[in-house]
Amino acid sequence: MKIHILNMEIIDEMNDTYIINISNKNNFTIVSFSSDTKELYFFDENELSIFLKSNEYQFRKILHNKRKETYYKGFKLKFVLQDNKDVGAFNDKLKIAVIDKIKDEYNYYTIEKGIEPTYKLFTDGSYNERTKTGGYAFIIIDINNNTSLFAGKLKKKSSNLIELIAVIKGLQKLKKTEHIRIISDSQYVKKGITEWVINWKLNNWITANGEKVKYIRYWKRLDKLTEKKYIEFEWIKAHSFHFENMICDYHAKKSANF
């Protein structure tokens, strides 16, 4: 899927409406956006404005997700839009998100059903508020249905970070494996690696709100581990009696508690 890297700069503001210059290597266009009413207006009619209109859902998502107080004159941001990206599919928790970096660093899309046979990596993390410790666990099932279980304790105080580390630990065990399906109950990790990282990298690991990305070191490590790989990311609901998820949940909690 072809991607387009664009630059955004807020060049003026008037009563919570911001005048924004959008540009690429060859062209620019001016838009206005109200952080209050969310009204978006295109001043120009050129190739770039037509492209933005045809991908308005993606463009609006960037504008809407940016907090009101972080809009100010002089703010700059790089961002990516994908040709005809199905944003609804990426928002559908039941769709499998794909990162295919075998040939292209920026190939992200969704599918209904995963490719078989493939290595499967089931992960989970747990944080114990009482002991202030965390635990992770992951299961690897290879293409011959051989199963391996790994678990460990962490001195981390964030459930999201522990979930992230669980995936990292699993992929480190699969460094030489090209095709992998990750099955996790963490939307944070799924959204991060399949949607957010691409824009974070363009902005030197700064978010659309102008803040440093949390857990940069770990996100960089996870991004590195996806290089030259085809990875499917499947989300499953926690505590939904999914067998491998239940096993990972049990061992992650056990590791955190001891």
Image: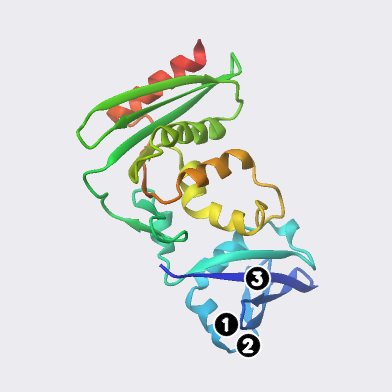
Sequence-wise, the earlier of marks 2 and 1 is: 2
Count numbered badges in the picture: 3
Label 2 and label 3: CA atoms lie apart by 16 Å
Determine the CA span between mark 2 and mark 1: 7 Å
Helix, strand, or loop for circle 1?
helix
Which residue is denoted by mark 2 in the rendering?
44
Q: Nearer the viewer, residue 130 or 76?
A: 76
Q: Which mark is residue 7?
A: 3
Q: Nearer the viewer, mark 1 or mark 3?
A: 3
Amino acid type of the residue that numbered disc 3 sits on in the rendered structure:
Asn
Q: Are marks 2 and 1 in contact (CB under 8 Å)?
A: yes
**Relative to 212, does residue 132 appear above or below in the rendering?**
above
Which comes before the other along the chain, label 2 or label 3? 3
Q: Quadrant of the N terminus?
A: bottom left
Q: Amino acid at mark 1?
A: Ser
Q: Which residue is mark 1?
A: 49
